[in-house]
Image (cartoon, rainbow, N blue to C red):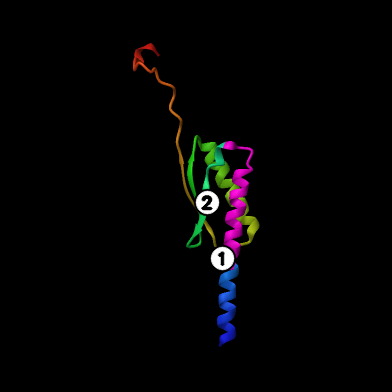
Amino acid sequence: MSDSVSLMQSTAYDRSSDENDVVLQVRERLQCSEYSTVRSVSCQIQAGKLILSGSVPNFFSLQAAIHLALRTLRESHLGEVRLQNEIQVVTPESPRDPTGDESAH
């Protein structure tokens, strides 16, 4: 009986360690990405989900971040981990006339 409890604890510990490794790998890929716009995206694992959060300036950057995370998950062989996207696309506003005169444009 104690052997099975010990094995279960060991398996849970290994999974937690593997999850931490995946988070570190995703963060590293985001930070080292050729797309500077995804470098501010953060990630964490909770309840079997890899959660991506933050903001990017366009849809392409969103897709790039998701692609990097999914590729890392596939390579990890972690199993049942789902990706939860909480990244927001926030388009920078165009420059405005500081006088507030919109008729000049």
Secondary structure at badge 2 equals strand
Figure quadrant of the N terminus: bottom right
Residue carrying label 1: 16
The percent coordinates of residue 88 (x first, y second) are 45, 41
Q: Is residue 74 magenta?
A: no
x 58%, y 63%: residue: 79
Magenta-drawn segment:
15-36
Q: Position of residue 99 (x, y in %)?
A: 35, 15
Is residue 74 shown left or right of residue 58?
A: right
Q: Is residue 30 found inside the magenta-colored segment of the image?
A: yes
Quarter holding residue 19: bottom right
Q: Is residue 54 above or below residue 44?
A: above
Q: Residue at x 50, y 62 (%)?
A: 48
Disc 1/disc 2 C-alpha distance (Å) = 15 Å
How many numbered discs, if any? 2
Residue lying furthest top in this view?
A: 104
- Magenta segment main secondary structure: helix
**Residue in the picture at 60% in, 44% down:** 31
Q: Residue furthest bottom?
A: 1
Most foreground residue, 48 or 96: 96
The amino acid beneath tag 1 is Ser
Q: Amino acid at mark 2?
A: Cys
For label 2, the residue is 43
- Single out the residue that lies furthest toward the front: 98
